[in-house]
Amino acid sequence: MLLTEEEFKSTFSSEGFINVTDTAENFNEKEFDEYVRNNLIAELGKMHIGYVYDAKDGSYRHVTFITDVKNMHYIVVLNLKNKKIFGHFVLDLNKEYGLS
């Protein structure tokens, strides 16, 4: 499910995030891969996982994909408490932070 900006931002912990890219375990690889395949956005081109961040309160994980489009990231949000995929969001850093 494509998340709205409000839904995406609701997954941010007031305690912040920690980079777990090198240590994160995929708790349901088949479901995750299937979700990403079924929700690809062609305009973003090829993607690969760049970073994985867990909320310090243990609520959500943001799996950040690097895309072919400069400063555009495809983020899959996982609910860590119920081990389900919450949705995905396309983060446009150009729009969000005035980058170009």
Image (tube, rainbow, N blue to C red):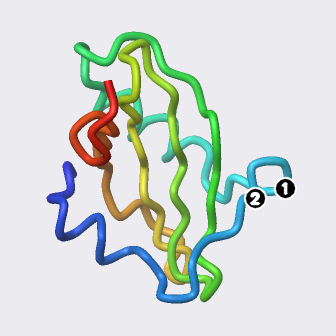
Residue 98 circle label: none
As helix, strand or loop, the secondary structure at mark 2 comes to: loop
Please state which amino acid type lies under the numbered disc 2. Answer: Val
Tell me residue 34's x, y (percent). Answer: 43, 35
Q: Is residue 86 above or below residue 29?
A: below
- Residue that mark 2 sits on: 20
Q: In the rendered structure, are the residues bearing label 1 and label 2 in contact, judged by CB atoms less than 8 Å apart?
A: yes
Q: Is residue 39 left or right of residue 15?
A: left
Q: CA distance from mark 1 to mark 2?
A: 5 Å
Tell me residue 25's x, y (percent). Answer: 76, 56
Q: Residue at x 30, y 70 (%)?
A: 9
Tell me residue 64's x, y (percent). Answer: 52, 43
Residue nearer the viewer, 17 or 37? 17
Please state which amino acid type lies under the numbered disc 1. Answer: Thr
Question: In the picture, which quadrant includes the C terminus?
Answer: top left
Q: Is residue 43 left or right of residue 33?
A: left
- Residue that mark 1 sits on: 23
Q: Is residue 97 left or right of residue 7?
A: right
